[in-house]
Amino acid sequence: MKLVISSVRGGKTPWADAAALDYGSRIQRYFPFEDRVFKPGTADEDAARLLAALPARTWLVAVDERGEAKTSEGLAKLVEAAAQSGLATLWFALGGAYGHSDAVRSTARTLLSLSPMVLNHAVARVVLVEQVYRSCTIRAGEPYHHG
C-alpha cells in the first residue's frame, strides 16, 4: 500500500517543508510515500483536482474540522485497516483555506479532525505527517511512541 498526504497551499513554508520531508523519509521505511501539493483555487477547483488525482482502489481520508478526532493509536488502527483492506493507496487530504467541499467529504471514506482548534496549513501538514509516521511505528511495535 502507498501512503499519500496531499495539501492545497500557495505560499512557501521552508520550516514545514523540511519537517514534512524528514517525517516523509521516515515513513518510507514502512510504506512507499508521496507528499503532493496542489495550488489553491476555489473550493470546487480544489476538489476537482484532488478527486481527479485519486487512483483506483484508494481509501481517502479528508482532514476536516467536522471529522472524528483520533488518538495516535486510533490512527494506527486506521492505517492497519487500510493496509489489510487490499487497497492500493491510503490518501490523506488537507484542504485549502476554506476546507473541503461537499464533493470531497462525500467521497472520503474517513473524515479526520486533527484538533478542535483551527491550525494553519503548515502546522496541520507537519502534525499530520508526524502522526502518520507515529502510526507506522506503533504498527511496527517500535519505541518512538510512548503511549
Image (cartoon, grey):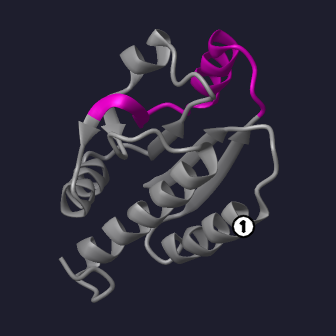
Residue drawn at x 46%, y 38% is 118
Viewer-nearest residue: 71 or 79: 71
Viewer-nearest residue: 118 or 92: 118
Q: Is 65 included in the stretch rendered in magenta? A: yes
Residue furthest bottom in the image: 143
Viewer-nearest residue: 22 or 84: 22
Residue furthest front in the image: 117
Residue drawn at x 63%, y 15% is 43
Q: Could you tell me residue 93's position as x and y percent? A: 51, 38
Magenta stretch? 39-67
Q: Could you tell me residue 24's position as x and y percent? A: 58, 67
Residue 110, compared with residue 49, is above or below; it is: below
Q: Is 75 included in the stretch rendered in magenta? A: no
Q: Could you tell me residue 4's position as x and y percent? A: 54, 49
User: Secondary structure under badge 1?
Assistant: helix
Q: Could you tell me residue 76's position as x and y percent? A: 25, 61
* Residue underneath mark 1: 15
Q: Could you tell me the amino acid type at mark 1?
A: Trp
